[in-house]
Image (cartoon, rainbow, N blue to C red):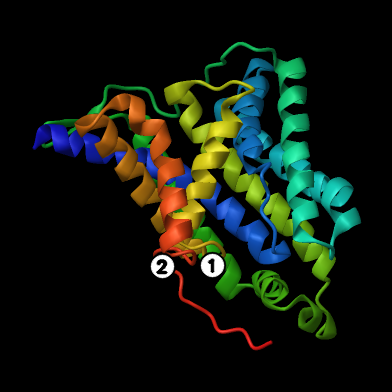
């Protein structure tokens, strides 16, 4: 039982990170109808910029906030410079642009920060916590807390603020939102910024445990996308559920089957869901009148 509990803790830790990345995919998909395959690079930038700002001498809390703000600004600039010029066209074009943008961001990070792995200090020092014989690293508690805080903040933003309702209106029907005075283009830009910020939070939270490097975004992007597909693309709550389930499946596979199969779980899950239930585990089917 101690071993099982340890695997469950590890799965929920990884699943929380996947959930943050999946939320970014969901937010951009709702706003544009396309997949932003640069989302994994925002995760990478969060960790790398956090390390960079601490090396400049900023205290860790300020460095983390600066990294999130800088990544959000990069996400907004990416939408304005790369996505906005082809907005309203074929979603496949947007997808191809985001893939190219991911490559550009990865190479820029390589040239700016170098190829070596970089370490970020833990948010809280101290020995691991104990729970019924299982160990919980203090950074894992931070990961859970930050994920819960992000989900709650996102729910409050969408449900309780005029700005959030404008974002929701744009994601549901952009033309109708324009008719009631919503600046739809600005909402799309803010969606990219918010998705980038969520990715940066994930990159910052996990960097003290696994270190970070210019190439970590690609793999995390695949797992975040798989989590969004598993839960139901376009539904933030479903994206979180998909991330947690994927993390648990990976951890149990590594523990009870073979650790070498762990990274393949996301791809297998994504393919199975696309064939069996394309709307995801928590998504409902829709009828479209044509």
- Residue 201 visible from this viewpoint: yes
Q: Residue at x 41, y 62 (%)?
A: 276
Q: Nearer the viewer, residue 289 or 224?
A: 289
- Cα separation, mark 2 vs mark 1, equals 21 Å
Asked which secondary structure carries label 1, the reply is helix
Q: Is residue 210 above or below residue 95?
A: above
Q: Quadrant of the N terminus?
A: top left
Residue 142 image position (x, y, % from top left): 40, 38
Sequence-earlier tag: 2 or 1: 1
Q: Which mark is residue 113?
A: none
Give the residue furthest to the left.
Answer: 1
Residue 180 placement, left or right of 106: right
Q: Which mark is residue 156?
A: 1
Q: Position of residue 255 (x, y in %)?
A: 23, 31
User: In this rendering, would 71 be left or right of 236?
Assistant: right
Identify the element where label 2 is drawn. loop
In the displayed structure, 12 sits above or below 59; it is: below
Mark 2 or 1, closer to the camera: 2
In terms of image quadrants, where is residue 134?
Answer: top left
Disc assigned to residue 282:
2
The residue located at (71%, 18%) in the rendering is 110
Position of the C terminus, as image quadrant, is bottom right
Residue 166 lies left or right of residue 25; in this view the side is right
Tell which residue pokes out farthest to the right in this image. Answer: 85
The residue under the point 40% across, 28% down is 124
Q: Locate residue 221 relative to residue 188 in the image: left or right.
A: left
Residue 280 percent coordinates (x, y): 45, 63
Along the viewing direction, whichever of 68 and 118 lies nearer the viewer: 118
Residue at horizontal 23%, vertical 35%? 7
């Amino acid at each position: 039982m101690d071993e099982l509990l340890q695997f469950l803790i590890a799965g929920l830790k990884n699943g929380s990170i996947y959930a943050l990345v999946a939320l970014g995919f969901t937010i951009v998909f709702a706003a544009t109808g396309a997949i932003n395959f640069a989302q994994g690079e925002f995760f990478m930038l969060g960790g790398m910029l956090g390390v960079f700002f601490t090396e400049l001498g900023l205290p860790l809390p300020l460095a983390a906030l600066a990294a999130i703000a800088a990544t959000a600004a990069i996400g907004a600039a990416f939408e304005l410079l790369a996505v906005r010029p082809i907005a309203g066209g074929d979603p496949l074009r947007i997808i191809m642009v985001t893939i190219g943008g991911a490559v550009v961001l990865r190479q820029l990070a390589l040239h700016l920060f170098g190829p070596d792995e970089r370490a970020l200090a833990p948010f809280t020092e101290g020995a691991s916590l104990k729970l019924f014989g299982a160990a919980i690293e203090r950074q894992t508690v931070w990961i859970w807390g930050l994920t819960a805080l992000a989900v709650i903040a996102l729910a409050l933003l969408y449900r309780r603020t005029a700005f959030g309702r404008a974002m929701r209106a744009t994601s549901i029907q952009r033309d109708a939102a324009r008719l009631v005075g919503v600046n739809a283009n600005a909402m799309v830009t803010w969606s990219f910024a918010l998705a980038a910020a969520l990715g940066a939070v994930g990159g910052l939270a996990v960097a003290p445990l696994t270190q970070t490097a210019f190439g970590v975004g690609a793999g995390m992007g695949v797992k975040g996308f798989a989590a969004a597909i598993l839960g139901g693309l376009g539904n933030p709550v479903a994206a979180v559920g998909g991330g947690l389930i994927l993390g648990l499946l990976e951890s149990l596979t590594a523990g009870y089957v073979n650790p070498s199969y762990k990274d393949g779980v996301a791809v297998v899950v994504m393919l199975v869901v696309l064939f069996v239930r394309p709307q995801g585990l928590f998504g409902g089917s829709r009828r479209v009148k044509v």
